[in-house]
Image (spheres, rainbow, N blue to C red):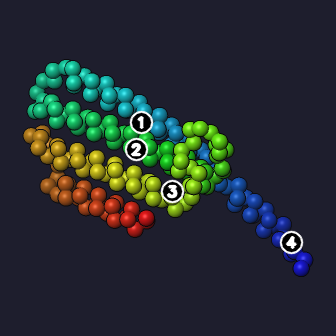
Amino acid sequence: MPQIKAPVTESLLEKIIFASRWLLAPLYVGLIIAQGVYVYRFFVGLWHLVHLAFGNPAGVWDPNILIMLNVLGLADVVMIANLLVMVIVGGYETFVSRLNFDRHKDQPEWLSHVNAGVLKVKPATALIGISSIHLLKTFIEVRSPEFVAPPDGVMWQVIIHIVFVLSAVALA
């Protein structure tokens, strides 16, 4: 059976559409820069934590609770940075171009089977972890005499967290 050749305009349009995936590359570079900002914020938070641990913070209602909140803040920064890596590497691999790390000793295990489905579930579970940390911080801060939040603020955080959990379960 003879193969029918597509008209020139259709072929050109298909090439343009396929090449448009490279418009995503600068967005991933921007996310890499954002990750650099998170690295900076991590070290600022770490410096603040060390200062709290070895200093004598005046007027602090409970230094141990304040240290715990700072540690949770650092964990939050790390989880967001992990989420960025998943989105950058997974998104680039899925939508732009293959990464040629097949035999690299440090290649993440999940990269060998990344696809759009995996790319939805991994960030969803990361968002649950991030939301859990924010919710835990809120529960701890509620005990603080300086805690100021709208009366229904904690309720909305719990509702949003439950929505994240249900969404991740639906995606899985």
The amino acid on which the numbered mark 4 sits, given as a three-letter code, is Lys
- Circle number at residue 55: none
- Circle number at residue 38: 1
Could you classify mark 2 by the number of other residues whose Cα lies within 10 Å: few (under 14), some (14-19), or many (20 or more)? Answer: some
Question: Which mark is in front, 3 or 1?
Answer: 3
CA distance separating discs 3 and 1: 21 Å
Q: Which residue lies furthest to the top in this view?
A: 55
The amino acid on which the numbered mark 1 sits, given as a three-letter code, is Tyr
Tell which circle, 1 or 4, labels the residue nearer the N-terminal end: 4
Residue 51: name its quadrant.
Answer: top left
Secondary element at tag 4: loop
Name the residue tied to disc 4.
5
Q: Residue furthest bottom?
A: 1
The amino acid on which the numbered mark 2 sits, given as a three-letter code, is Ile
**How many numbered marks appear?**
4
CA distance separating discs 3 and 4: 35 Å
Residue drawn 32% across and 36% down?
Answer: 74
CA distance separating discs 1 and 2: 8 Å
Question: Which mark is in front, 3 or 4?
Answer: 3
Name the residue tied to disc 3.
119
Question: Which mark is in front, 2 or 3?
Answer: 3
Tell which circle, 3 or 1, labels the residue nearer the N-terminal end: 1
The amino acid on which the numbered mark 3 sits, given as a three-letter code, is Leu
Circles 1 and 2, Cβ within 8 Å, touching? The answer is: yes
CA distance separating discs 1 and 4: 51 Å
Does 159 sit above or below residue 106?
below
Residue 108: name its quadrant.
Answer: top right
- Percent position of residue 50, x then y: 27, 24
